[in-house]
Image (cartoon, grey):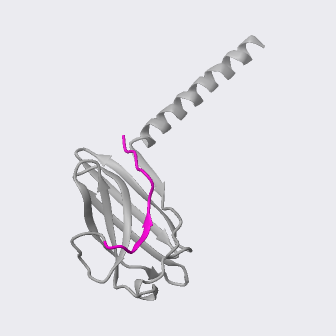
Amino acid sequence: MQQNLQIRLKAGATSFLALILALSLGSCSNKVNFQTSSIVPAAEGWAKVKRTDNNYTVRIRINHLAPPKNLNPPQEVYTIWVDTEANGIKWLGSMKSSSGFLSRSLKASFDATIPYQPVRVIITAERENHPEHPGFYTVLQTGSINVR
């Protein structure tokens, strides 16, 4: 009985250490869901920010994102912005929604590496491909992102 208890304690300690290791590895990145949009209510997705050396990688995945031409008023492109801790709002690029093969789900994805720490991701619909600042047509945004 005593030996059985010792085996269980060792197995429990090993499982506990494995859990701590998994949590500590996952703490280097943060995955945040986009808030529900009144402009494109079916759209759902997430942004994941990970620190790599002196840079940050931003990965965005969205499902059910209507083409910008279907918005009211119609727009040309979705633009990705990050609100940063020390450098204000920065333009990351443009994103288009597309239909996958044998899928009616409109999907969009975007990946970038940036030198400044983002605290929020914003997606706007714009008439031009590379605007100087975000327009008033905010489609999706995350809450606060806390990257360690």
Residue found 27% across the figure and 70% down from its top: 93
Where is 23 relative to 92, above or below? Answer: above
Q: Nearer the viewer, residue 11 or 44?
A: 44
Q: Which residues are magenta?
A: 135-148
Q: Could you tell me which quadrant the N terminus lies in?
A: top right
Question: Looking at the image, which residue sits at the far top?
Answer: 2
User: Does the magenta segment cover residue 143?
Assistant: yes
Expressed as whole percent of the image width and height from the top left, the position of residue 123 reads: 38, 68
Secondary structure character of the magenta stretch overall: loop
Where is 67 relative to 22, above or below? Answer: below
| Residue 112 as seen in the image, left or right of residue 97 | left
Q: Nearer the viewer, residue 63 or 76?
A: 76
| Residue 42 as seen in the image, left or right of residue 61 | right
Q: Nearer the viewer, residue 19 or 74?
A: 74
User: Does the magenta segment cover residue 23?
Assistant: no
Residue found 52% across the figure and 76% down from its top: 64
Q: Quadrant of residue 28?
A: top left
